[in-house]
Amino acid sequence: MAFVQVAPDGPPLSETRHLARALDAAIALQPNVLNLSFGGPEDRLLARLVEAADARGICLVAAAGNGGSAGRTPFPASHPKVLGVTAVDVRLAPYPWSTPGTAMDVAALGVDLVAAVPGGYRRVSGSSYASAIVSGALARTPACARDRNPAAMRAAVVQAARDLGAPGRDPRFGAGLFRLPVR
């Protein structure tokens, strides 16, 4: 089955073969963190690459989706070796199009941000922006940069999160608002 990311009202954006080549090239570079701001159905080839990245000590962060409350947390955010990130606004309210789910790990600012675009700037929102913020913050953490221990990173991030919504882990915010782990 070809992996295809489909915008809610747009055309297919990629296929497994293209994503697999990109992931394989990224894994070969051995980054501390890989931000996976794409999503779609479960995919065996991409899942093997996620497993390979994790085995090499690469911390993986993914956008948890913008499919609305009727959607499902997309792959790769749904993969257990990936930190799934959803978006919240400055008042810590969930992004209206966020996709809830049991695979949700944490929430981060991802609503009404200013981003550079060709010719200037514009306001953007979505879980891809939230996951990029988390990825950048994790790049120099000991678990990702020194120890190269993605499992420790995921545990530390969940432990450090500030609980939001109903007490405890929930499908809207995961463990809560992302905060850098102390260690």
Image (cartoon, rainbow, N blue to C red):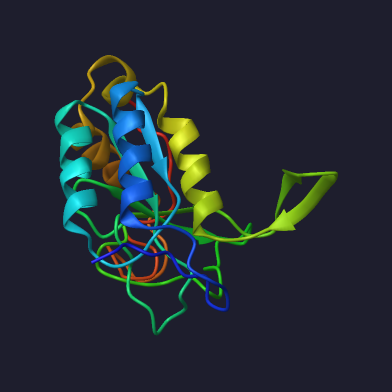
Q: Position of residue 15 (x, y in %)?
A: 37, 58
Residue at image position (38%, 79%) is: 71
* Image quadrant where residue 33 sits: top left
User: Which residue is situated farthest in the front direction here?
Assistant: 17
Q: Position of residue 173 (x, y in %)?
A: 39, 63
Vertical placement of residue 100 versus 62, above or below: below
Position of residue 60 in the picture relative to residue 93 (left or right) = left
All told, the count of numbered labels is 0
In this rendered view, identify the residue nearer to me: 22 or 52: 22
User: Which residue is situated farthest in the right direction here?
Assistant: 119
* Image quadrant where residue 25 sits: top left
Q: Position of residue 144 (x, y in %)?
A: 30, 25
In this rendered view, identify the residue nearer to me: 28 or 32: 28
Residue at image position (39%, 85%) is: 70
Residue at image position (32%, 70%) is: 171
User: Which residue is situated farthest in the bottom direction here?
Assistant: 70
Q: Position of residue 162 (x, y in %)?
A: 40, 51
In this rendered view, identify the residue nearer to me: 153 or 180: 153
Position of residue 5 in the picture relative to residue 20 (left or right) = right
Vertical placement of residue 147 versus 59, above or below: above
Residue at image position (29%, 29%) is: 27
- Position of the N terminus, as image quadrant, is bottom left
- Position of the C terminus, as image quadrant, is top left
Vertical placement of residue 143 versus 73, above or below: above
